[in-house]
Image: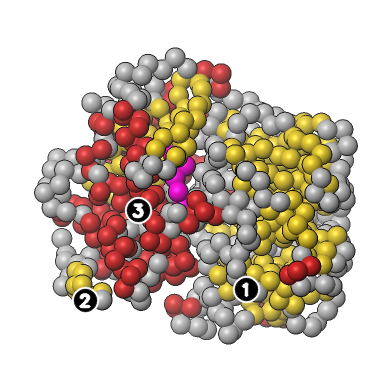
Amino acid sequence: MRKDNIVENYHGTLVADPYRWLEDSNDPDTQAWVKEQNRITRQHLDIPLREELKRRLEELWDYPQYELPLEAGGRLFFQKNDGLQNQPVLYCQEPGGEPFAVLDPNTFSADGTVALTRFEVSKDGKLLAYATSESGSDWQQVRIRNVDTGEDFPETIRWCRFTNLPWTPDGKGFFYSRYPEPGSVPPEDQSNFCQVWYHRVGTSQEEDILVYHRPDAKELSFSPFISEDEQYLGLVVVRGTASRNRFYYRPLDSREDFVRLLDDEDAAYWPIGNLGSKFYFRTNLDAPRGRIIAIDVNNPARDQWQEIIPEGEDVMARAHLAGGKLVVVYMRHACHRIEIFSTAGEREGEVELPGLGTVVGLWSKYAAQKFYFSFTSFLCPPTVFSYDLEQGRLEPFGEMKLSFDPGAFETRQIFYQSKDGTRVPMFITHKKGLQLNGDNPAVLYGYGGFNISVTPAFSPAHLMFMERGGVYAVANLRGGSEYGEEWHRAGMLENKQNVFDDFIAAAEWLIANKYTRRERLAILGRSNGGLLVAACMTQRPDLYGAVVCWVPVIDMLRYHKFTVGRFWIPEYGNAEANPEHFKFMYAYSPLHNVREGVEYPPTLIMTADTDDRVVPGHALKFAATLQEKYKGKNPILLRVEFKAGHGFGKPVSKLIDEAADIYTFILTQTRT
């Protein structure tokens, strides 16, 4: 195994990096090594059990799946997957008519690896702007389609990432955000210098009009939107993944510079909408759990801001204007509920949800009496509902046919103490009548970062595991938003060790309370959660029977050097530039804490060759380091997916294969 003599000095500490060559996915040595790693992994996973699991996964996945609809021009637009289609199809439905397909991403590629990642419809419902990505990339291409004829206009818009596509009221064009064309800036700036442009339908991208950019602040990115009353063009301005943001606006028909209404980055300000010159924002300014304020842009001084809904005991997760009301989604102990308020902040009622779960998304208009939302739980696939504000009536949208009985399972929420005494919630789901004898296989999942809450969500893969007697547990670790910004900050930067302590304590609780035992406990995490399980594995290798480390962030000293990694500096820190950051990051960085002479549990490390968010080099270097230093019998496997990214838009066929591999590994390694 090739090892290079690379040593760097971090503030007086010499750190070796012998597998840096694996950061280059195009290096022939890297490609040959990955090919051999995949061959070894397939020897472990391609067994009769995998085929059995895959058959059941296909059955569980095969149900109609609807995504959140929207209305435009009196038409309803929604995505639907019949069950095992690689990608959902976009449909349009006239009032009282049958839905017809507008766009079928399954026709874009033979293997389903081109995904529809965003779409927005013109006001009259006649034109569709849609973005696609290839092989899981975060980069998007935007096309325009005539809804009635199904024909695309000739132009293609490139160099976009996660852009909005708000149409102007006349339907002649839309705004979008993009990044520099490759080669026009140094490679390290490819995801900097975001710009907002206007595109006129039927013209080439070269003719687009530059609307806004900030070359003096290259790390800012902009999400354009048009107010529902068609009076304003707004920009939500963010710096990387920081939870604090800015807000700019200007009259829609203006060519003047944008007014920087909120430009201090002192809190989060998420626009809800406007009533005339009064803009409503959900913010955590002086309210870690969130509140709603109103700012009159004609009188924007801070002492004139109006508090509409004050901070409460529960976290304010989202808010919308609908039917002349404020619709607010609250989160209590990582479960959602919906309350209705007047625009003056008076509470008027609550929407009765199907149970304890998650409001995945909500679509509304101020002028419409009906809004749509999607609800899910550990035992309920995402289900779309409409709610009539006048009638107070909740109705399901679309059909639901399942190949399992949700009533055969149960979810409970418990609270346990972390190392420092902090009370942490955890969901536990399993078959009814489970015997707490310490002999059940169990999977513990966590994330703990970036202000992202881990609320109940349905997974055919985890359900299949529970059908076989497994216990699925989700710990709501610090670093997320389950209890607001304070909970987030308790798990970031120098407090990151709290996240690992929370997860380790969750594993210990499951074992102490006889849900499982060490040998039968697997831990699972992806992305920042991959960092989580890798750090917990290196800190407490004695505690787990198996580890699945999925598209992980691993090298905490160099993560900021790859693709969009520098956007995560507010969350993790910068070990290269800041000696204080180096101390706490080096202390937990999984790559730098693999030790010789330690008995590591069976480990499956998973990545994808075209992941342009968390580059595969993290996983490859971790696998190589573990395989070098660990001399025991437990397998240390690397699975590299091809034509796949960080998970965005992954076809169903790949999702099923991935799940079959994960649970083949878990079930074989925790069988003892």
Q: CA distance from mark 1 to mark 2?
A: 36 Å
Inspect the image, locate mark 2, and give the three-letter code of the amino acid beneath it. Answer: Gly
User: Mark number for residue 12?
Assistant: 2
Q: Residue at x 31, y 50 (%)?
A: 534
Q: Nearer the viewer, residue 256 or 422?
A: 422
In this picture, is 413 found above or below 180? above
Q: Residue at x 23, y 56 (%)?
A: 593
Q: Residues within 10 Å of mark 2 (few under 14, many from 20)?
A: few
Q: Report if residue 332 is visible in the image.
A: yes
Q: Give the quadrant of the C terminus.
A: top left
Inspect the image, locate mark 3, and give the three-letter code of the amino acid beneath it. Answer: Gln
Mark 1 and mark 2 lie on one chain; the one further toward the N terminus is 2
Look at the image and say whether residue 238 sits in the magenta stretch: no
User: Mark number for residue 264?
Assistant: 1
Dividing the picture into quadrants, the one containing residue 269 is: bottom right
Q: Nearer the viewer, residue 61 or 210?
A: 210
Inspect the image, locate mark 1, and give the three-letter code of the amino acid beneath it. Answer: Asp
Dividing the picture into quadrants, the one containing residue 8 is: bottom left
Image location (x, y in percent) of residue 334 = 55, 40
Q: Residue at x 35, y 25 (%)?
A: 513
Q: Residues within 10 Å of mark 3 (few under 14, many from 20)?
A: many
Q: CA distance from mark 3 to mark 1?
A: 29 Å
Q: Which residue is mark 3?
A: 497
User: Mark number for residue 514?
Assistant: none
Q: Give the quadrant of the N terminus.
A: bottom left
Mark 3 and mark 1 lie on one chain; the one further toward the N terminus is 1
Q: Secondary structure at mark 1?
A: loop
Q: For the magenta stretch, what is the residue range?
A: 475-479
